[in-house]
Each structure stands twice: as C-alpha cells, then as structure tokens.
Amino acid sequence: MTETMARPRPLHRRRTVPLYLLAVAVGIAALAPLMRLVEDPPRAAFTVRNDTVWDLDLVVRTGPDSEVPLITIKAKSTRKVAEVIVPGDTWHFIWRFADDVGTSTVAHDDLRREDFELVVPDEVEEALRAQDAPPSP
C-alpha cells in the first residue's frame, strides 16, 4: 500500500475540559459569596409627624460614629419618608433644631408596620421651650 491508501489511524485523544471553562467555573465559585455585598439593602417607609412649632431635622444613627440625615420636617406637618436603608434591629433617631434636642428609639418590627408614625417626642418641645428657641416662620 502506498501512503495515500493507508488506513487512517484511530485518534485516541482524551477529552479534556478546555482550560478557559475551568477558569470560568472557578471564578464564579469565588465570586458567589461576594454577591451578598452588592445586594440591595432592605429599606423602610414610614410617616413622621411634627406637632411642634419648630422645623426639625431628623437624622438616623447608622453606627457608633455615623449618622444619615433623613428629612427636615416643617412645623405642624406630617411627611411620608420612603427608601430609608435599614440600619439594624433598632433604629436611633436624632431630632435636631440647631443642636440635638431629642432622640427616639424604635424597634425595627414596629417601624416596618404599615401604619407606623414617628412622632416628635415631648422632650423635644420641652428642650426647645427651655432654650427659648423662636418658632419657625
């Protein structure tokens, strides 16, 4: 037989996974735990009521040394607050006029109720009256 008439040799190749597929699989496995870091954090919505004659700033304490300003609520008004990132099991609100004039601590489950209303505490009005703070225009 000539070379052109020779029988083809059987190819005995091992089937292997291409290296790039293996790298992709390892990459996905390594990134899966990190996906929790990019998840949208839980949020809350609630109503804030200010029965005082002062405009007040409302701040939420998110950690020992961090605060996030939420809203300024006008005197004698009610305002809906939405899309507030949940800081944990307990919420610590700070009421401010020029300085801190009071706080409100609310359990997360209470705040998540549909009808929850955060009312300016009496201590805020008492503190502002004691300071002779002029009412907001």
Image (cartoon, grey):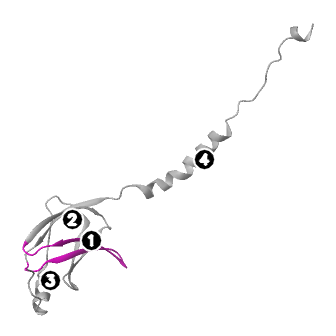
| Residue that numbered label 1 is attached to | 91
From what the image shows, is residue 15 above or below residue 33?
A: above
Determine which residue is flagged by label 3. 124
Q: Which amino acid, mark 3?
A: Val
Q: The disc labelled 4 sits on which kind of residue?
A: Val
Q: Position of residue 14 (x, y in %)?
A: 74, 29
Which of the marked residues, 4 or 2, is nearer the chain's N terminus?
A: 4
Is residue 61 magenta-colored? yes
Q: Which residue is mark 2?
A: 111
Asked if one can make out residue 23 in the rendered structure from this viewpoint, the answer is yes
Bin the neighbour count of mark 1 within 10 Å (Cα to Cα): few under 14, some 14-19, many 20 and up.
some
The answer to whether residue 64 is visible is no
Q: Residues within 10 Å of mark 4 (few under 14, many from 20)?
A: few
Q: Does the magenta portion include 60?
A: yes
Per the model, the C-alpha gap separating discs 2 and 3 is 20 Å
Amino acid type assigned to the residue bearing label 1 in the image:
Trp
Front residue of 47 and 3 = 3
Question: Do tag 4 and tag 2 residues touch (Cβ < 8 Å)?
Answer: no
Measure the C-alpha gap from mark 4 to mark 2: 42 Å
